[in-house]
Image (cartoon, rainbow, N blue to C red):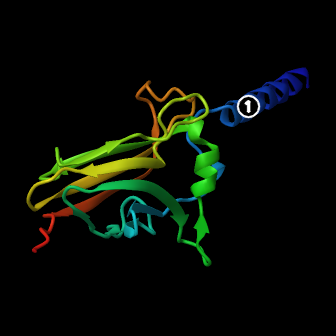
Amino acid sequence: MRNSFFSLLALAVIASLSLVQQGCGHDHDESKHGNITTLQVILTDGPTTVSAKAVDLDGDGGNPPVVDTLTLQAGRSYTGRIELIDESVNPPVSRTEEIRRDADTHLFRFTVLGGAQGRVIISNLDTDSKGQPFGMRFNLQVTSGGTANGELRILLEHHDTGDKGAGVFDTDIEAEFPVVIQAATVASN
């Protein structure tokens, strides 16, 4: 009888330790900010607005994402912002403010590829409460020159520890936008 009691006690201790370990884990939990299926880039240059969305309703695997092309004008400077949406529910739910509130643990990374590399320059990322880069708002400069095609990859990293330089993160969403740079038009007299 005494051995049974100690066996039950040992099982109860092991089970409770298992629950504590699961509750204190550092694995990324999307329920902290909800599901993100859509990343939208909005660029403004005075009265002109350029917008493109990447939508992946079923997440990794399954169907490929539907991604719009970013058509940019050579020699222009844009002010950019990112909107994040969960379109897997009806009506869709914006996740932008949730991520903004959690800026200390998130970082948007921008990579320009192909013929747009060196032509599209991302700068002036907004910062979190610690002064670290965040990137939900940014500047995008397109250098002057002829037409070009490439890609703009945007990755939203989630850093549980808040150490954005550690290189350890989970990916909340990643999108690769085709980029078309149009040559500036010359006004004739």
**Farthest residue toward the bottom?**
90
Give the left or right position of residue 134, taking residue 111 as reference: right
> Residue 4, position in %: x, y?
85, 27
Query: Which residue appears at 50% of the width and 30% of the height?
Result: 132
Decide: few, some or many residues near mark 1? Use Cα within 10 Å; few <14, some 14-19, many ≥20.
Answer: few
Query: Which residue appears at 13% of the width and 64% of the height?
Result: 183
Secondary structure of the residue carrying numbered label 1: helix
Give the left or right position of residue 76, taking residue 134 as reference: left
The image shows residue 22, relative to residue 173, as above or below, that is: above
> Residue 157, position in %: x, y?
45, 42
Query: Which residue appears at 59% of the width and 64% of the height?
Result: 94
What amino acid type should be assigned to the residue bearing mark 1?
A: Val
- Viewer-proximal residue, 15 or 59? 59
The image shows residue 111, relative to residue 189, as above or below, that is: above
- Viewer-proximal residue, 166 or 74? 74
Query: Which residue appears at 89% of the width and 26% of the height?
Result: 5
Rendered-image quadrant of the C terminus: bottom left
Q: Mark 1 points at which residue?
A: 20
Give the left or right position of residue 164, taking residue 2 as reference: left
**Farthest residue toward the front?**
189
Quarter of image, res 44: bottom left
The image shows residue 185, relative to residue 41, as above or below, that is: below
Give the left or right position of residue 165, taking residue 120 as reference: right
Rendered-image quadrant of the N terminus: top right
The image shows residue 131, relative to residue 174, as above or below, that is: above
> How many numbered circles are shown?
1
Quarter of image, res 90: bottom right
Quarter of image, res 28: top right
- Viewer-proximal residue, 93 or 59? 93
